[in-house]
Image: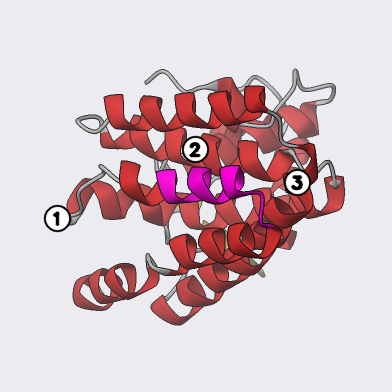
Amino acid sequence: MDIDAHSLHTRFPATAEEEAYAYVLYRIRMGICKAGDRLIPEDIAAEINTSRMPVREAFRRLASEGLVVIRPNRGAIVRGLDANEMEEVFCMRGALEGLAARMALPKITSKHVAELTRLIDVMESLEQDVQQWVTAHRNFHEYLCQLCGRQRLIAQVSGLHTVVEPHMRLWVELADKPTTSRDDHMTIIAAVKAGDPLMLEAAVREHIEATVPALRDWMTASS
C-alpha cells in the first residue's frame, strides 16, 4: 500500500528505539496490528533487526500515548477505544481543530486555499480505495491545522488522529459508509474564503462532530 509520507509525520529514525516506535506505530495506524492483538517484542525486534530493549522502550512510549496497554507479566497489547471514548476523542478533535483553524485563518493565502482544494480532489479521486482515502482525509485536516503554526496544538491534533485512525480504517472498510464528502469539506473552504474566524471554527467543529452518531452506531452494533 502506498501511503503519503505527508501524513505519517516521521523522519528517518535516529535510534533503534525510534525505529521500533515508528514501525509499531505504522502497523497500528494502518490496522495491521488491531485492538487486542498481542505485541511480541522478540518478533518485532527480528523484523527490524534490533534487540528487544528498544522495542520495549517503544512500547512504553506508545502506552503513554494511549495506543498500547502494557500488562505486568503478560506483555503488551494494542489498545482500542469503546464508543464513549471514540466520541470523546472526536469532540476533542472538533474543539482543537476548530481552534487551530481559527488561529490559522490570518495566515491562510490563496496558495493555501488551492492546496486545501487539491487535497479534497485527492480524497474524491480515492473514493474507491477506502484505505488510501483515510490517509488523504487525514492529510486535509492536518494540513489545515498546521497552518496555525502552533506546534503544541498541532502535536495534540496529530495524536488524536492517530488514536482514532485504526477505527476509521475499519469503519470505512466494513461499514456502509460513503467516502465521498466533498460538499462537507468545501463548506470549510467556503468558511476560509469568507474570512470569518468564528465561522471557520464552527464549520470545522461541526464537520468533525457530525461523524460521531454514525460511528457510534456502527461501533455499538459491531461490539
- Tell me if 68 is positioned left or right of 12 in this view: left
Task: Tell me the kind of residue under disc 2.
Answer: Arg
The furthest residue to the left: 176
Residue 69 showing in the rendered view: no
Residue 187, magenta (yes or no): yes
Residue at 61% x, 31% y is: 8
Q: Is residue 115 magenta?
A: no
Q: Is residue 220 above or below residue 60?
A: below
Residues tagged 1 and 2 counted as in contact (Cβ below 8 A): no
CA distance separating discs 1 and 2: 24 Å
At x 58% / y 31%, what residue is drawn? 113
Which comes sooner in the sequence, label 1 or label 3? 3
Q: Where residue 15 sits in the image (x, y, percent)?
A: 84, 25
Which residue is denoted by mark 1 in the rendering?
A: 176
Q: Residue furthest front?
A: 194
Instruction: Read off the magenta span.
Output: 186-196
Name the one closer to the observer, 17 or 13.
13
Q: Secondary structure at mark 1?
A: loop
Residue denoted by label 2: 27
On the image, the x and y values in percent for residue 117 come to: 47, 30
Q: Dots 1 and 3: beta carbons under 8 Å?
A: no
State which tag comes first along the sequence, 3 or 2: 2
Depth check, front residue: 184 or 72 = 184
Query: Left of 51 or right of it: where is 149?
Result: right
